[in-house]
Image (spheres, rainbow, N blue to C red):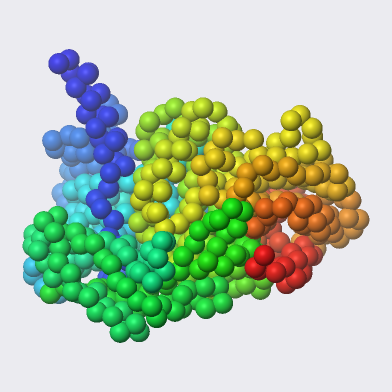
Amino acid sequence: MKKSALLFILMVITTTFSFAQEKLMTNAYNRASTSLNGYWNYIVDPYENGFYNYRLEPFENQKNPGQGAFFTNSKIKNKLDLIEYDFDKMDSLMVPGDWNTQKEKLFYYEGTVWLKKSFNYEKDKNTNRVFVYFEASNYETDVYLNGKKLGKHIGGFTPFNFEVTHLLKPEDNFLIVKVDNKRKKDAVPTVNTDWWNYGGITRGVKLIETSETFIEDYFIQLDPKNDKRIIGELTLNGESKSQREVQISIPALKLKKKLYTNANGKVSIEINSNKINYWSVENPFLYDVIIKTEEDKITDQIGFRTIKTEGSSILLNGKSIFLKGISIHEESPINGGRGHSKEDAQQLLNWAKDLGCNYVRLAHYPHNEHMVRLADKMGILVWEENPVYWTISWDNEQTFLNAKNQLSEVIDRDKNRASVIIWSMANETPTSNARNIFLTKLANFTKEKDPTRLISAALEQSDYRGNPLIRTIHDSFAEVVDILSFNQYIGWYDGGIEKCITISWNIEHDKPVMISEFGAGAKYGLHGEKDTRWNEEYQAYLYEETLKMIDQIEQLKGVSPWILVDFRSPRRVLPEIQDGWNRKGLMSEKGEKKKAFFVLKNYYDNKRISN
Ligand code: GCB
C-alpha cells in the first residue's frame, strides 16, 4: 500500500477513535476523589509550536518527540540546553475557569493554550486504580501525564476520563493539557453561534481512585411501563467483573437485593415496590440508593417518576403538567464568564424559582452537573440540549459521530437524574434531507440508549399553506419528536408587537406543543414608550402580547422564553445598548430584574399547572 494511503487510513482511525473515549464512569459526582483544581501554569500557543515540529508533524507521532514537545515538560539542566519554554516560570490560570474572563489579553482568544498541573499522589491501597476525570474542557483537549499521551476529547461541555494507574507516581507527576477552542466548520457547534466561545478547562478536574474491580456504570430508573417497578442495569469494570455479587439497597424503601453479574460484568436490575414516594415538582423526593460489591460501594440520590406524553398532554407520574419554564445559558451570575460552581447553579435556579418556573431549558449545550443535581433537589424539570445549532455539516459522518458522542456523554452523566425529562437534539436547524437523516439517527440512538425520557428539538415555525397570518410547523422531524417545540420571534425579528394579535396557529400534530423561545432585547434601566426597541417597556409589552397569542395554541403545554439573564455574544455590538451582550434577558448580567420578568411571573402565577 502506498505510504500516503496508509497515512490517510491511520488518520481516519485516529480521528474516529477520538470520539470513542474510555467509558465514562457514572456518578463521578459522589465518588471519593482528589481535586486537581486550583492554579495551573499555562502557555498560550497560537502557532501550536509545542505540538508540531517545524515540518508541521505532531511531536506525539514521533518515536522520540524531543524536548520541544510541551507535553515533555522539559527543563534547562545544562548551559547548552536549547529548550524554549518553561511551564514553571509561566503565569497561571485558575481551573476550573475560562481564559477569556481571567486574562484580559485572552478575552477574544480562540486557539491553543497548554496548561500544566504538578502533583503528588499516594494511593490508599496498592491494588487500587486511578482515573483522571475532566468535567468539561472547551473544545478539543489532548491530555498527557508524565510525558505520555492519555487521549483526546472533542466537545466542550461533557465529561471524560482516562485511566492513569500505570503512569502515576507518588511524587512529581505532571499533567499537561492542550486545550484548543478554535471554531471549525465541521464541529459541533459549528463556527456560527450566538454565544461566547469560552476556552479552557471550564469545569473541574479530579483524580478518582477505585478498587481493582469497581462499579463503573449504572442506569436506575422507574419502569416507564410500570410505576411499581424500578429497573436498570449495572456494569463492573476490572479483572474479576464476572459472576460477582452486587448488592443494591434502598433503605427508605426497606429494599435490599442481591444480584450476580454475567461474564461481561453486567447485571440487570428489577426491584418491585408498591410504596414508592414519587419524585415530582411538589415533592422532589430522592432516595439514597446504595450499590455494593465486596470491594466497592457507591451511593447516589435518585428520584423515581414517570414521564410520558399522551395525545397533546405531558404526563408526570400520570398527571398532566404545564411546563412553566425559562431558557438559561451557562454564564456565572457571580463572577461572569462560563459558570461552573454550585453557587452559580444555585443562583440561576433560585431566580428561575422566583420567576415561578417548574422547568428550565438548559440551552444550547450540556450545562455543569450542579444544575441537574440541584434541579433534582429543588423539583425543577429540565430540558438538556445537544449543541447541534443552526448550520451543522449535515453530510459529514465525522460531524455526526461527534454530535452523537456528545449526546451520549451527557446521557451517561445524567441518566439517573429524575429532573431531566427531555433530551433535545438540536436548535433551529434548517430543514433538508441530510439534516432530517442526521437528526433522526440521533433521535433513534437516544431512544435506544434512554427509553425513559422524551425527545424534542427547538424547531422553527412557518406560514400555513402560504398564509403569513396563520402559522404552523412544517418539518418532517416533527414526526419523530415526542414534544413539538419551536422558537418564534413575532414582534422582534418578525414584524412589530402589534403583529401578535393578527396571528393564528394551526398545528396539526396531536402532540404537546412547547414554545422553546420567544423574546425581545431590552437594556435594563432604559425606559420609554412601549413601541420603541430596547426599552424595558417594549420587552414587557412583547411578553404580554406573545403570551396571549400563544395561549391560543390548543396543544400548548409549555414555554421557555429567551432568556433568564443577559449573556455575552460577539454578534451583539450595538454601542450603549448591547456592547457585546445579548439583551434578551429578563434580568441584566448583574441580576437586576427588568419589567418583563414580572409579566412572565404574573402569567406563571396564574397559570394552572394541570390542564
Ligand atoms: C434564537 C437562538 C438563540 C439566540 C436568540 C436570539 O433563535 O436559538 O440562540 O440567542 O435566537 O437572541 O436571537
Percent position (x, y) of residue 499?
A: 85, 44
Q: Is residue 98 left or right of residue 209?
A: right
Look at 64% across and 58% down and name the residue there: 558
Percent position (x, y) of residue 97?
A: 45, 60
Percent position (x, y) of residue 307?
A: 49, 62
Residue 83 image-quadrant placement: top left
How many numbered markers are drawn? 0
Look at 60% across and 58% down and name the residue there: 313
Look at 17% across and 15% down and name the residue there: 2
Would residue 263 be seen by someone viewing this image from the given angle? Answer: yes
- Of all residues shown, which one is farthest toward the top? 2
In front: 520, or 35?
520
Q: Is residue 242 left or right of residue 452?
A: left
In front: 204, or 60?
204
Residue 303 image-quadrant placement: bottom left
Which quadrant of the rendered structure holds the C terminus?
bottom right
Look at 44% across and 79% down and name the residue there: 277
In front: 193, or 145?
193
Would residue 334 be seen by someone viewing this image from the given angle? Answer: no
Q: Is residue 611 above or below residue 141?
A: below
Which quadrant of the rendered structure holds the N terminus?
top left
